[in-house]
Amino acid sequence: MPQGIKDKVAILGMGCSKFGERWDASPEDLMVEAYNEAMQDAGITPEQLDATWFSTHMEDVGTGRGGIPMSIALRLPNIGVTRVENFCAGGSEAVRAAVYAVASGACDIALALGVEKLKDTGYGGLPVATVGTYIPQWYPAAVAPANFAQLAAAYRAKHGIDKATLKEAISQVSVKSHANGAKNPKAHLRKEITVDQCLRAPKIAEPLGLFDCCGVSDGAAAVIVTRPEIARELGKTDLVSFKALQVAVSNGWEMSSSEWDGSYFHTARIASKKAYEEAGISKPREEISMTEVHDCFSVTEMVTMEDLQLSDEGKSWRDVLDGKFNADGAIPCQIDGGLKCFGHPVGASGIRMLYEMYLQLQGRADQRQLADVRTGLIHNLGGQPNQNICSVSIVGRLGE
């Protein structure tokens, strides 16, 4: 049986750039912005880094291939830089690699950094990226909003929810995230919205309207990790440690089997179950203090709450309307504003989610700070409902 990662690796420091339409900054500038904050937070010099992992997805719009762009941008001391790409879950994968390297003893201090500069593409959505092999020949010819709209339709049909109620619930998801994001100086969108605005917004793909979709953005985030004993030697206290790091990847079953009804994320159920086991969590609704969920679309967040066992199956819409995931609810979600307010620089999103957890667990989230945060869950999703990479990470205070 695997021993798991629980409490073997701690966060030494983190940094996050301002997300948004960063016409003022190159990918290198964004990397430096996140890196400088992380290094200052960690209190170390570049020579103390042993290895790094670099998450970026759209290499053809300026972030570059391989590890050289990051090494040059940060003037790293000729240490290893490994580029990680796993669709929108790439940031979490970079973190997993760095954490595993430290836990193994292969290195003492490692850096994971994610960046994406999407506004420079001039394209309103994410550029199309092939998944390789012959998959595109039998993959549904649909854009992301259409694929996730089908998730909403399947969920509504399976659970017998009327159209207006579902629309009101997913609108509330976005209203909640905007209320949180308005308090975050690093968020792309910082304006509160109303349910009425969501209901009246232009349709993108029924039932998803403009406010049900996250935007495209530029940004970078970084994390420096080490073993707890090294962190203490460096004078750190109040350590945040990793409790679980799990990834589940579709193998074609959802798209090719009639057993999958399209109303949930198969991989999220597998990854979360393994993550809870690794972290020693038996009652997630009582033991998870807050979540950051990959809300590429509002319906994604709502459905994922059931996959994470934080809502009863077929009842997450009710929990959303009851405010369970609001800032003052039982399990706050997207307290930083989520993808809805940060946008989605693909390679950076997973690390950006971890950044909010780190701040909250250390009591440093300013006006967004929640009371008594002890354990946080990060859900990072790459791909479509019928074919994806799902990462579920759990962090908390060391030893708790």
Image (cartoon, rainbow, N blue to C red):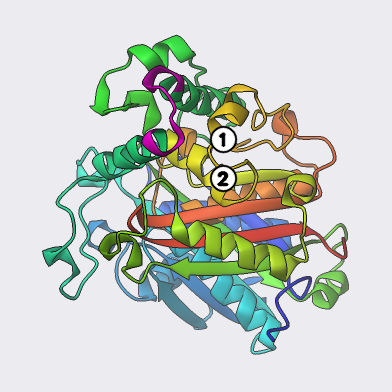
Q: Amino acid at mark 1?
A: Ser
Q: Would residue 222 be seen by someone viewing this image from the given angle?
A: yes
Q: Would residue 23 be seen by someone viewing this image from the given angle?
A: no
Q: Where the N terminus falls, by quadrant?
A: bottom right
Residue at the outermost left position: 137
Crowding at dot 1, Cα within 10 Å, few <14 / some 14-19 / many 20+, comes out as many
Q: Position of residue 389 (x, y in %)?
A: 42, 63
Q: Amino acid at mark 2?
A: Glu
Find out whether residue 160 is within the magenta segment.
yes
Where does label 1 land, which residue? Answer: 316
Marks 1/2 in contact by CB < 8 Å: the verdict is yes
The Cα atoms of the two marked residues, 1 and 2, are separated by 6 Å
Q: Depth check: give the residue in front, 307 or 77.
A: 307
Where does label 2 land, which residue? Answer: 306
Q: Residue at x 15, y 73 (%)?
A: 134
State whether residue 392 is above or below residue 18. below
By secondary structure, the bulk of the magenta-drawn segment is best described as: helix
Magenta-colored span:
157-165
Q: Position of residue 377 (x, y in %)?
A: 65, 52
Find residue 124 and report its image quarter: top left
